Amino acid sequence: MIDLYTWTTPNGRKVSIMLEELGAEYQVHAVNIGQDEQHDPAFLKISPNNKIPAIVDREAGVELMESGAIMIYLAEKYGKFYDVGEGRLRVLEWLMWQMGGIGPFLGQVHHFVKFNPGKAPYAEERFTKEAHRLYGVLDRRLEGRDFVAGDYSIADMAIWPWISRFEWQQIDLNQYRHVRDWYVRIAERPAVQKGYQVPKFMNDVPMP
Ligand SMILES: N[C@@H](CCC(=O)N[C@@H](CS)C(=O)NCC(=O)O)C(=O)O
């Protein structure tokens, strides 16, 4: 049994989608970051960086924060979604690309463009430009491929929830047709539909 500490955000959904894909038994603990529950001392013991997601694997006595580390841990534990397609190194490469690029920079687009428009025009311009650059990189990677590392892997599961906020990022997915086709292909998976609604329903999975 895995305890999942999460909220309705891309980083949280990465792990709930993965747990659904694995068919793993898990218990959800909602950490409402809008109400500062991530600073609760009990949660900080599991996630000292005060961010979701985090897991506890009771059987194995493991407590883990950081979505990338959690996904690698689960992939190794269940022997799935890691050593696939073009191999472990490619999966790792695109997973790290998500962790270092897509997550932090699209997160800044949400902050400046979606939630604080007009306050920092330079930041809006800089992060929107970077978002388009990253979408371009992903589009080129997906040309002639169904998934970023050949077969469906934790790299796709990590990137996809960030792309699901394309409307927040004011990105027209039709401008990036390989990304759009990949996005729809993954969105249609039952486990993704289910994992997206953890810890609670917010909206239907956005479709282009
Ligand atoms: N690098 C971390 C980032 C996690 C993260 O940024 N989580 C956000 C929600 S998506 C959060 O918990 N924010 C609360 C806060 O910053 O106080 C990961 O991938 O797990």
Image (cartoon, grey):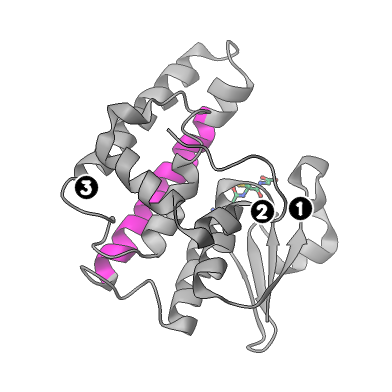
Q: Position of residue 5 (x, y in %)?
A: 70, 62
Task: Give the side of residue 205 with respect to residue 92, left or right.
Answer: right
> Could one spot residue 18 in this view of the protein?
yes
Return the mark for residue 51. 2
Q: Amino acid at mark 2?
A: Lys
| Image spot of residue 182 (x, y percent) | 32, 47
Q: Which residues are magenta?
A: 89-109
Q: Where in the figure is residue 4, as x and y percent of width and height?
A: 68, 67
Residue 66, visible in the rendered structure: no
Q: Is mark 2 within 8 Å of ligand 1?
A: yes
Eye-nearest disc, 3 or 1: 3
Q: Are marks 1 and 2 in contact (CB under 8 Å)?
A: yes
Q: Residue furthest left?
A: 144
- Which residue has dot 3 on it? 141
Image height of 32 relative to 177, above or below: below
* Label 1: how many Cα within 10 Å (few below 14, some 14–19, many 20+): many
* Badge 3: residue crowd in 10 Å (few <14, some 14–19, many ≥20): some
Q: Nearer the viewer, residue 138 or 39?
A: 138
